Image (tube, rainbow, N blue to C red):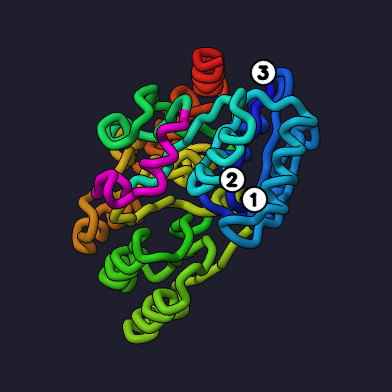
């Protein structure tokens, strides 16, 4: 089998990281592993193994015939057998399926908010799903949604994973930093975290809050910064933008948090585990299942409950240490690539 991962960009997002992880992890297990980026390269390109075949289309519009020809030629030349499409790249993958009917098309659903709508809200996806050979979802709720709303009935839940090489020994350089790893947009609800932190920062003056992620929505960013200034926590809150290598930042932090109102299966929770961080996350998407009994789960949109969970960790180094150890062990045993990648191969084989 020759498997091509198809993704719109290599910006620092969860779906993008998974596309890279899958391409890297498949490389020694299949005849050929490839990754194609349709629209925009980004910092994650540096994470792609040299052995993985790579193509950048520089696609400029939805109907970009030059990009279509380039991808079709590549697929034929490399004798690709399967396209594994992530996110909105499903349309481009479907066009390739029309032109090369022998291709097997797998669609990977990462978008946790999808379950709040119906097939009528996602007409392009619903139409293209007639041509999918299989669908993979990152959580069980999305699996049920896809079975009920899409035309493809071969739907499988396979959780995200993190490579074993990402698990690093916790250093002694831990600092009183809370880190939030997610792009800055309303669905990630950084505002709830800021409100929680502003309630308790006077009790823990040595602690700082770091936001790591692309500043996607500038008006939302300004709203966050206005809140920071109005509540006199500017010296304690840091917007760090996109970081090519997140693990040094995670390793020197003390707590990893997510405050989203909607999620699929956030890669950040796996990366916190690999970096040895205790975690706090909101009860959305697959977060409760990932964290299990090894961290703290709070309701979304609840600054009061988030502040309480923060206090419990900030005020107890012993609890942080135990939670860190237990959570890292749990993530390694449950969500490392060795545990998950074979499930993707099983799906590819089933539709071959």
Q: Which of these two is toward me, 333 or 235?
A: 333
SS category of the residue bearing label 2: strand
Q: Nearer the viewer, residue 55 or 64?
A: 64
Q: Quadrant of residue 156?
A: top left
Q: Which residue is mark 2?
A: 7
Task: From the viewer's perspective, tell me whether residue 212 is left or right of residue 31.
Answer: left
- Binning the other alpha carbons within 10 Å of mark 2 as few (below 14), some (14 to 19) or many (20 upward) gives many
Q: Earlier in the sequence, mark 3 or mark 1?
A: 3
Q: Which residue is mark 3?
A: 1
The residue indicated by pointer 1 is: 38
| Secondary element at image label 1 | strand
Residue located farthest toward the bottom when viewing the structure as drawn: 230
Q: Which residues are magenta?
A: 113-132
Question: Which quarter of the rendering shows the C terminus?
Answer: top right
On screen, 242 above or below 201?
A: above
Q: In the rendered view, would you say 233 is above or below 301? A: below
Are the residues flagged by discs 2 and 1 in contact, CB closer than 8 Å? yes
Q: Residue 346, how many percent across, how many down?
A: 51, 15
Look at 71% across and 42% down and name the residue there: 71
Distance from label 3 to label 2 (Cα)? 19 Å
Does the segment drawn in magenta span residue 114?
Answer: yes
The reply to whether the magenta stretch includes residue 225 is no
Residue 44 versus residue 286 in the image, above or below: below
| Pointers 3 and 1 in contact (C-beta within 8 Å) | no
Left or right: where 322 falls relative to 67: left
Q: Residue at x 77, y 29 (%)?
A: 78
Mark 1 surroundings: few (<14), some (14-19) or many (≥20) residues within 10 A: many
Looking at this view, is 171 or 36 the one in front?
36
Expressed as whole percent of the image width and height from the top left, the position of residue 82 reads 61, 26
Residue 160: percent from left, percent from top:
47, 34
């Amino acid at each position: 089998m020759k498997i091509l991962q198809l993704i719109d960009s290599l910006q620092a997002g969860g779906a993008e990281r998974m596309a890279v992880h899958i391409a890297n992890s498949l490389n020694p297990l299949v005849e050929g592993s490839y990754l194609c980026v349709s629209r925009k390269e980004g910092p994650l390109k540096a994470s792609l193994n040299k052995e993985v075949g790579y193509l950048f289309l520089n696609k400029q519009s939805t109907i970009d015939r030059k990009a279509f020809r380039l991808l079709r030629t590549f697929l034929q030349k490399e004798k690709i057998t399967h396209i594994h499409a992530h996110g909105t790249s499903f349309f481009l993958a479907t066009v390739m399926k029309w032109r090369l009917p022998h291709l097997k098309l797998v669609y990977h659903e990462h978008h946790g908010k999808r379950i709040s709508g119906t097939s009528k809200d996602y007409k392009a996806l619903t139409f293209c799903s007639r041509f999918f050979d299989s669908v993979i979802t990152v959580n069980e709720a999305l699996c049920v949604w896809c079975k009920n709303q899409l035309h493809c009935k071969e739907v499988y839940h396979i959780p995200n994973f993190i490579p074993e090489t990402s698990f690093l020994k916790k250093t002694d350089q831990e600092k009183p930093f809370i880190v939030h790893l997610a792009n800055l947009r309303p669905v990630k609800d950084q505002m709830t975290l800021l409100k929680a932190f502003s309630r308790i920062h006077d009790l823990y003056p040595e602690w700082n809050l770091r936001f790591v992620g692309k500043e996607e929505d500038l008006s939302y960013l300004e709203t966050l910064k206005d809140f920071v200034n109005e509540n006199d926590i500017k010296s304690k809150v840091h917007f760090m933008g996109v970081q090519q290598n997140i693990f040094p930042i995670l390793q020197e932090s003390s707590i990893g948090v997510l405050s989203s109102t909607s999620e699929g299966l956030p890669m950040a929770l796996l990366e916190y585990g690999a970096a040895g961080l205790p975690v706090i996350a909101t009860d959305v998407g697959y977060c409760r299942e990932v964290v299990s009994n090894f961290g703290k789960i709070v309701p979304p949109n609840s600054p009061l409950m988030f502040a309480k969970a923060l206090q419990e960790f900030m005020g107890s180094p012993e609890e942080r240490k135990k939670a860190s150890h237990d959570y890292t062990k749990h993530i390694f045993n449950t969500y490392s690539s060795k545990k998950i990648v074979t499930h993707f191969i099983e799906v590819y084989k089933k539709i071959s």
